[in-house]
Each structure stands twice: as C-alpha cells, then as structure tokens.
Amino acid sequence: MPANQFTPTVYSLTGKPGFSGNYQETLSDFGRFMRSEMETRLGTFIDQYMNFQEKQGETVSGDREVFLFEALMLGVFWNTYGGYAAGSGSSAISLMQQTASLRSHGGLKRKAADIIRGALAYRLLEKPSDRSRFLFPDPRGLARLIAWMKATGEFHREAARLETWKNFLEQMGDTSAFVTLSVFRGFARWFSHESLLVLGPFTEGVTRFVAVAANAYPLREDKISVLRSRTEYHLNMLGADIYNRAMKPGFDNCSERIVLLPACMKLNGGKKCQSAIRDGSEICTGCTAECNINVIRKLGKKHNFGVEIIRHSSALTAGNSFKRPGTAFVGVACAATVIAGGLELRKHEVPAQCVLLNHSGCRHWSNKPVATSLNISELMNRLGIETDQQPVQEVKCQKSEKTLAA
C-alpha cells in the first residue's frame, strides 16, 4: 500500500463507527481491575523493591502503584524488544547511543544525527531476524536491554527508570533475579492478552499502520518509535491512569493551572499559525476561531487556566523550566508517547496530570498531517473544573498544512 494511504487514526479514543464504548469509563474500569491484579501477582516483589529503595535513602511513600506499573513496563519492554537487544552488537549499540546523544543537542547536530539514524538505526537495532532471539533474564540481560533502549533515542526516560530496577536485581543474586524477571515477563504476556480484549477497540488501526509503515519508512529516523505494538499503546493508556492517580495530590495543592498542548493540535500549522513567544513560552493568539488550541485558550480565559504550546515532546527535557511555585500542569499527548512525558515531569517533581489526544495526526504517523483533538470534558475533569456538559465540540481531523510532532 502506498505511503500516501496512511490513516491518521492509528488509534482512536472515539472508536470505530458504530462502537458504543466510552474510553474514559473503559479505562477507569480496566485500571481498577489491573491495579488489583498487579497487587495480587506482583505485590511481594514490590515489597522487596520498596524496602531496597528505602535503604538507598529514597522516599517511596505513595509510589506503590507506580512501582507496580514499572514492573509491568519492564516485562512489556523485555517481551517486545529483548530479542533485538540480544541480537544487536555492542559496537552498534555504542554507535547509536552516540547519535542519540548528538541528537539531543538540537540544531545542525540533531539534523546530522537524524540522517545517520535514518540510515542505520532500524537496520542495526531492530532487525526482523532478531525479534525471536532470547535475552536471558538476569541483571546482565536487563543492562543490555537498557543500553539498547538508550541507543534507540526513543526510550531514554523509560530506560532511566529501569536502571533502578537493575540495581535492585543485582543485589538479589542471579537466581532470585531470574525468578523475578520471569514473573514480570509472564505477567506482561497476560496483560497483552487482557488489554487487547478491553482496550483493543481503540487501537485497531495500529496493526494496519505498522504493516504499511514497516516498508514505507525505509530511511526515517523515527521508524522504531512509530512501529510500536498495540500492547505498548495499551501500556501507555494504563500508565496515564496510574500516573494521574499518583500525581493528583500534588496537582490539587497548586492554585494555578496551565495546559500544555502539542503543536499537532494547530489547525493552521507552519507559517500561517500566528502564535507568539512570550516569556519563553509559545502562546496562542487566536488567529483562527476553529482551531482546537484557540478553543481551549478561550476556555482558559473563562475558567482561569493558562494554555501553552509544546512544539515537540522533547521540549519536556527542559523539565526544570516547568517548575514554577504554585503552578500545576496538564500535559496533552498521544497514546504512543504520553508516559515518556509523564516520566520527565515526574522526574523533575512537576505537579501534573495528563490527557490523551483522541487520535494521532502529526508527521510521524501520517504523511498528510491532520489537526488532532481531545476530549474537552476529560480536560476539564483533570483541571478540577465542573461543567454541566461539554462546552465546545472539538474540531475533527481537519487537514493542517504542516502539523508538527506531538
């Protein structure tokens, strides 16, 4: 299938035509079920992990659900990418780690790194022949998986969290580490099956997209990023629910609220968008009435919250720039990347909540970008603002001249 036939609805929180399910209700029920199952099946390991963290001087109060989720995340990444990590040579991983580091500098260095990564990343790090290779479940295997994740340039935030798990496993001894990782992997396989049954109606487009993009993105630096499995989308959806719960107390303690909207929501991308830079932040000036960002800007004026535009999720690497006393943030992102952004804000202790975009639409997932949208009722709920009904209907999948990445 030609690349120009990519669908902008790789996932859709509104479901396919005729689907009667409600995403927020479905996720809430699934999250409740999964938290119970994680506690039952993984709770003993989390007890040990929390004791280890406390001995290291870490504060773990209120983080239990997050640690349960990290154990699941570890299992999902191992099952998904362990074979690639086992099959990638050390020299290839080292080379790609260097390009990933170079890419973080931005400007010409980023462009040069992207050229190198477009030519080499997928061929060196995610060869189809390596998919079924076995990565032995021990601390050395986890170290290799972490190195591979860093080399991709796409999972460095997740890899940083797994470093603490590697330290924990190393002090357990190989036999106990083997048992622990085997349990995590088994639970992740079960999660993959259960999440497909419940959240699958919202991610049906992923399978078709991956089948097309695998061949149509031969030299794209983002190929590894966009070829994510449905299980990873479901993992991010569950993670959004868990991180929202964990971060809500700090969020509620802040008097000022700011919503961070991705540039892919712009109706007029590129030069036609008349947003302005004020005090280092990109601000909507209301140039187009129908633009979703402008719609939310108007709601902000009515309900006393600010709105800023994030051109790319990499902007969150400057997490300290969001540390403003008394200010909390609602980050909006697509289902493929929401946890990475949440991890960055959490790392910098920024009070936050997150809302998923209704669908993907930027250049990473479509060669004809469309303006993305979100559920405004859910946004208002995260902000703690009560409304009788959804105040404004979102603009649906309108074409944008040049929509940037979320």
Image (tube, rainbow, N blue to C red):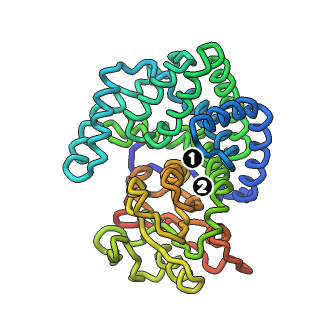
229 up-or-down from 94: above or below: below
Residue under label 2: 12
* Category of crowding for the residue at label 1, using alpha-carbon neighbours closer than 10 angstroms: few (below 14), some (14–19), many (at least 20): some
Q: CA–CA distance between discs 2 and 1?
A: 8 Å
SS label for mark 1? helix
Instruction: Tell me the number on the disc at residue 68.
Output: none
Residue under label 1: 205
SS label for mark 2? loop
* Whether residue 63 can be seen here: yes
Q: Is residue 272 left or right of residue 109?
A: right
- The reply to whether callout 2 and callout 1 are in contact (CB within 8 Å) is yes
Three-letter code, disc 2:
Ser
293 up-or-down from 168: above or below: below
Camera-side residue: 252 or 87?
Answer: 252
* Category of crowding for the residue at label 2, using alpha-carbon neighbours closer than 10 angstroms: few (below 14), some (14–19), many (at least 20): many
Q: Picture coordinates of residue 218 (x, y %)?
A: 33, 36
Quarter assignment of residue 177: top right
Three-letter code, disc 1:
Gly
Q: Is residue 159 left or right of residue 273?
A: right
- The quadrant the C terminus occupies is bottom left
Camera-side residue: 336 or 342?
Answer: 342
* Whether residue 10 can be seen here: no
| Residue under the image location 45 percent in, 49 percent down | 6
139 up-or-down from 158: above or below: above
| Residue under the image location 43 percent in, 57 percent down | 319
| Residue under the image location 39 percent in, 44 percent down | 2
Camera-side residue: 244 or 79?
Answer: 244
Q: Picture coordinates of residue 142 (x, y %)?
A: 51, 24
309 up-or-down from 73: above or below: below
- The quadrant the N terminus occupies is top left
Disc with the residue nearer the chain's start (2 vs 1):
2
Q: Picture coordinates of residue 30 (x, y %)?
A: 75, 48
